[in-house]
Image (cartoon, grey):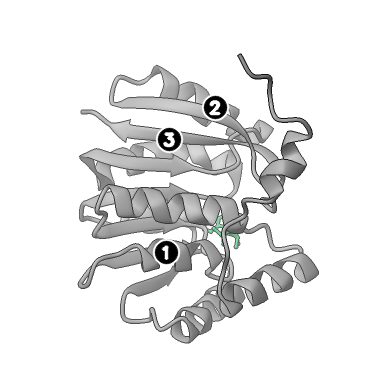
Amino acid sequence: MSGMIPDMENYFRGFIPPRDALLLALEEEATRESIPIVGPVVGEFLYILARAIGARNILELGTASGYSGIFLARALPPGGKLITLELSDAMARRARANFLKAGLDQLVEVREGQALDLMAAMNGTFDLIFLDIDKESYASALPHCRRLLKVGGLLIADNVAFAGADSFNREIFGQKAWRAVHLLSFLPQHSPEKDGLSLAVRVE
Ligand SMILES: C[S@@+](CC[C@H](N)C(=O)[O-])C[C@H]1O[C@@H](n2cnc3c(N)ncnc32)[C@H](O)[C@@H]1O
């Protein structure tokens, strides 16, 4: 039986997925300005999950500069759509410019405002929801996620190792509408690199 790979964290830094010039520029900008983006590993994870489930309609909470949204939108089939919600007008403007640069502006709609209010006014059925706003709002966003996600749809929540996500973690784990798993992970270039991700499917 073989042992574990030594110096695992450095070893896995060697498997960070390649990115194009736009994503690399957004990463540099995020480092410079302390914008807490998901980074290349979780970005690729989002792309893979969205592709694997054939997501056509995606909702993102927390756009920032559009970095994670670019991964999600690139996973969409022709005619698919990403709606992404952002509190800050300045960030929403930057994200729109970045989606345009990425050639994704026809697939992406950035809506400005408090995500919980915007969700309360929304109808429609999403295949995937990505939750990445202030962690204290995760638990309050959960009933909206349940209403807006199709049965069988996927809810992905970032940063669930933050103390503010505790009530969300407990809620989703305890509700029979969801089957959920929390993964404590090493995520190179994620903010922070050791953090939790929650994956849940709406089962009813
Ligand atoms: C962690 S960053 C999002 C990073 C982005 N998902 C990425 O990886 O590229 C969180 C963003 O959500 C916004 N935000 C925080 N709380 C929010 C809320 N309650 N409603 C809408 N946007 C919110 C912040 O302004 C910030 O731009």
Crowding near the residue tagged with mark 1, few <14, some 14–19, many ≥20 C-alpha atoms within 10 Å: many
Q: Which mark is residue 167?
A: 2
Looking at the image, do the residues carrying marks 2 and 3 touch, with CB atoms under 8 Å apart?
Answer: no
x%, y% of residue 47? 42, 56
Q: Quadrant of residue 24?
A: bottom right
Give the camera-side residue of 114 and 65.
65
Quarter of the image that includes the N terminus? top right
Q: Is residue 112 left or right of residue 59?
A: right
For the point 69% across and 53% down, the residue is: 189
x, y (%) of residue 82? Answer: 34, 65
**Residue 188 x, y percent position in the rendering:** 68, 48
SS category of the residue bearing label 2: helix
Q: Nearer the viewer, mark 2 or mark 3?
A: 3
Q: CA distance from mark 2 to mark 3?
A: 16 Å
Mark 1: secondary structure: strand
Task: Tell which tag, 1 or 2, sits nearer the viewer.
Answer: 1
In this rendering, is residue 22 above or below 124?
below
Check disc 2 and give the amino acid type. Ser
What is the three-letter code of the residue carrying label 3? Leu
Residue placed farthest to the top in the image? 1
The disc at residue 84 is 1
Rendered-image quarter of ligand 1 = bottom right
Instruction: Say whether disc 1 or disc 3 marks the residue closer to the N-terminus.
Output: 1
Identify the disc placed on residue 199: 3
Q: Earlier in the sequence, mark 2 or mark 3?
A: 2
